[in-house]
Amino acid sequence: MPRIRSVTGSTPGVHRRTMLAATGAVALAGGVGYALRPEEARATPAVAADAEGAALASSRRAPAAPLAPYTRGTTLAAVATPGSGSGYRRLGEGPGWQRVVRGELAAAKTGRAGRRTALAAFVQLTDLHLIDTQHPLRLEYLRSTDIHAWRPQEALTVQGATALVERVNALRGAPVTGAPLHFAMTTGDNTDNNSRTELEWFLKVMSGGRISPNSGDPRHYEGVQNSGLKQYWQPDAATSDADKRLGFPHLEGFLAAAIREVRSPGLNLPWYSTVGNHDAMPLGCYASHGDSYLTELAVGGRKLMELPAAEAARLQNALKKDADPRGTQYREFLRAHSRDMRAVTPDENRAPFTPAEYLKAHLDPAHLGAGPVGHGYSTANVDAGTQYYSFRIADDVLGISLDTTDPGGHYEGSVGAAQLRWLERTLRENADSYALVFSHHTSKTMDNTRPDPARPGERRHDGDDVLAVLGAHRNVLAWVNGHIHRNAITPHRGSGDHSFWEISTASHVDHPQLARVIEVADNKDGTLSLFTTLVESSAPSRTDFTDLSQTGLAALYRELSLNAPGARTDLAGEAGDRNTELVLKKG
């Protein structure tokens, strides 16, 4: 595979790891998709691709300028903590989470803090789920059988995600090594319903811009929260709905504020994108691209908002059992309930987007932000119809972004044989670089091996097959992912004495709404350490119900997510899944 080497990596006869260990250099990239070559006096575009269309991007080197460890704004310093009591609970600032050293894969040796050299530092954001709450193809009506099917905070996802961007921008360095943050990676489910409205909002949140989190009527909200239906929180109405009976407030003007323009500064560091099932398929599970009826309903003027509990249970069971991957039964269900739908304002921008349109939107210069061009994706991906790529994180560290969505349908994942071969080859040809692998699905949620309709003869591989490939290469340090909306860190032992960590991070739509800073350091004693530090958004912990500004709504987003009826209380994980030092042997 074509390689793009940096200045350091081009020195004849010198192994890059040896050079970094000898000099203590911090080779972190801070640019916008460029590489510096020895024979060139200026930065030049550097994107190559292999025969299967997976791109290798490279970033311009930043000066080595280690900073003091920076913990302000991280969960080491403080954590939003609910008050005591039952019913609706208010959030306030509580004590931070301590760091836990995990030595299942290698013993932590004394004195390493004084020896270590930083190799990379970055931020992972996952499962933002930017939601067009007025979209006609949403499943809110399943709340009649399952209280989890609709969340009271969903109208505020854009405000919440923007506050997370503001928090990342405020970080002045990595919490442990003090190294400059190199980039941010989103590990999928950036959107919620494969809608063009949501995709535009996501790209503007990440790269900067003005966002109107509204669709349909530009003047008014039209959805379940002003429907008068008591199974949903009706914030502006005097209706005694189910959520108000649990203590949710009456907030006059909430819906008008929720669809008001939001301004995102965009990330001030390069960001890369990984695709999730909600980005790839309508409702995150239906392989229904090209279905004219569902597309017409998505952009049209009718929306189903309520359903008897028995019918809702049947539809939900079909979803959970993966009984309708192409959405055939779902289409017939909607036809049968056409007379029960309410009128809403049509909007062509709610149309589903195809994988090719997803790639082209990332490549649009309007969404460049801090770069790189395409945010990892390239025209080679568009030409080949692929959504996986590799990129140079630092002279000694390679990033690999996988596409674990199954185009055959369902919300669990897998990878095709061609992608698995590409992964194995990329790891083999970059054996002198440490490797960090990114995906949406976790190893345990890759159990859907339904054939890809575009490649019906190609075998699909599950999570165990991916673990086997990663475990066979000594340069793999970590597999970083999301999907499960929960913090979980799992040790994996590969072939021989090789080992690596799987790092799964909670979502930013469900409480506790977190992102994660990950640092890679060489301890100079035969071991490496991966430091994981969770961060919350910049929104205040304590809310003010009279403050419906952009910041006030972002704070409310956090508190509503805490109080969502039926919300799980285990998504933060155990202490060893949060702020950690993960030790492993040097490959």
Image: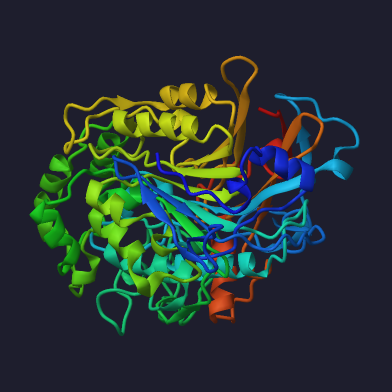
Can see residue 575? no
Quadrant of residue 151 within the rendered picture = bottom left
Can I make out residue 492 in this image? yes
Residue 546: image location, x then y, percent: 59, 81
Decide which of 442, 135 is in the foreground and name it: 442
Q: Residue furthest bottom?
A: 219
Question: What residue sits 10% from the left and 59% below the top?
Answer: 339
Closer to the camera, 92 or 196?
Answer: 196
184 sits to left or right of 181: left
Compared to residue 73, the image places residue 454 above or below, namely above
Residue 141 spot, x, y in % from top left:
30, 53
Relative image position of residue 98 (x, y in whole percent): 80, 46
Tell me residue 530's x, y (percent): 69, 40
Q: Residue at x 62, y 22 (%)?
A: 498
Instruction: Classify residue 296 by image quadrant.
Output: bottom left
Residue 148 vertical placement versus 560 (above, below): above
Pick the quarter of the image with the N terminus: top left
Residue at x 62% of width, y 24% of height: 499
Residue extending furthest top? 496
Check the image and report above or below for 458 versus 512.
above
Taking 317 as reference, is 131 left or right?
A: right
Viewer-side residue, 129 vs 552: 129
